[in-house]
Amino acid sequence: MTDPAAVEPTTFVLRARHVLTMGAAGHVRDGAVAVVDGRIAAVDGYAAIAARFADLPVLGDGGGILTPGFVSCHGHFSEGLVTGIGETHTLWEWFVHVVEPIEAHLTRDMAYVGTLLKATEMALSGVTTVGDMFCSAPGTPAITPGIVDALDVVGLRGDVSFGPADVPHGYPVDRIVAEHHALAQAAAASRRTRFRVGLATIPSSSDTLLAATRSLLAETDRLHVHLHEVREEVTASRTARGASSIEVAARLGLLDAQTVAAHCVWLSDDDVALLRRHAVAVAHCPVSNMILASGVCQVPRLLRDSVPVGLGVDGAASNDSQDMLATVKTAALLQKVHHQQADVLTAPAVLRMATLGGARALGLDDTVGSLDVGKAADLVLFAEASPSMAFVHDPYQAVVYCAGTRDIAGVWVDGERIVAGAQILTADVPAILPHARELAVELATRAGLASELAVT
Ligand SMILES: [Zn+2]
């Protein structure tokens, strides 16, 4: 495998016709970013940067649009080998018929291969930071270190969690805790990945698992959890515990951690107040909410109420692509058609959710999410020499509505180039495809998904 750091410098000037910093400098025309040892040293007009950093090599032809790397703050690498199945199911049915059957059959090799493919797909769509929750049975040996190994190869920044459930299967909680610890250990030894405590949902957790999760948060004060994705979840929680999942989580102290909550579609006023009080961030996943007919997250209301909102591609079994640009565009379209109001969510607002909003949701906004001095050089350069980007009236709208993965000229993480000319530089995808196909068939067969496959 070629280490991009060995062939490309992490100290350079990157020039573009439009620099959308999503930070203090706003929109800089004919701008540039100076990168020194993988960190942003300056953001300004090109002339000023060229004068100040005259010794540095200049990348880019001066055209195109430069943005911060995108942050996808919710997804499931556990679904990396399960795509294009089950579109006729709503979430509860889909879980029973597609996802739950695979969870007992996932292996570390499957975690590695699925992550390698899906992380590459994300990188090719401009993602530089990925928040993930791997949902499987706890493994012996542990499964989830496979995610970290693959992210190290692709070069993405990771915020990874294991998302266990023990209702109704009754997986022993000590094995669940061991899987968390194995992932934490792997992340601690990784290039750019950190560990977060995960929990699939409140209704699929026993009181014992909830208590164990609370204990884990004393070690790592970060939580990734699904909350109120569908009405059935709220009903199940109220039926079993007499309160909504958000109320139960708050009562148990789970939301005192730095929490990213996926979906939050079905919210009462009290739920919103609790999210706000506990500074819980919402990972909005518009594509999976639409495929699974889950509902419409009230994004404008959450933003008005100062609830941080980021975007997630969600899992490969419920999107089913991992194309962040498609998620960005869909996020805008869904709110416009739902509210029947064209200005309810604009391109700059959506781009902010995809960058700084996601970084805030993961508690990483001191490191990534905007092009500000001192932050990591996580960058995406959109080329302008293409049919879709040939002319740009408004660069925000060009990125949100016009751009496709084919237009991505470069992606850098910590100043290391991992994508050039819409091609991944780090992972050898063609070499792994035959094995990936074998594993995908093996997983579907072992999980008994034959009836789902026959539907299509
Ligand atoms: Zn999810």
Image (cartoon, rainbow, N blue to C red):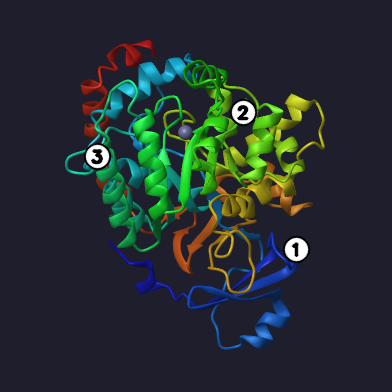
Can you name the residue that lies furthest to the left here?
A: 141
Q: Position of residue 32 (x, y in %)?
A: 66, 72
Q: Quadrant location of the C terminus?
A: top left
CB atoms of marks 3 and 2 within 8 Å: no
Sequence-first tag of 3 and 2: 3
x and y, in percent, of residue 128 in the image: 49, 55
Which numbered mark, 3 or 2, is in the foreground of this view? 3
Secondary element type, mark 2? loop
Mark whose residue sits in front, 1 or 2: 2
Tag 2 residue: 265
N-terminal label among 3 and 1? 1
Q: Which residue, given by chain and number where applicable, does mark 3 sit on?
A: 174
Q: Nearest the camera: 319 or 222?
A: 222
Q: Residue at x 49, y 57 (%)?
A: 421
> Residue 310 placed where, x, y %?
60, 45
Residue 26, numbered circle: 1
Q: Is residue 96 above or below residue 179?
A: above
Query: Tag 3: Cα neighbours inside 10 Å, few (<14), some, or many (≥20)?
Result: few
Q: Which of these two is toward me, 21 or 171?
A: 171
Residue at image position (32%, 53%) is 184
Q: Earlier in the sequence, mark 1 or mark 2?
A: 1
Three-letter amino acid code at disc 3? Answer: Asp
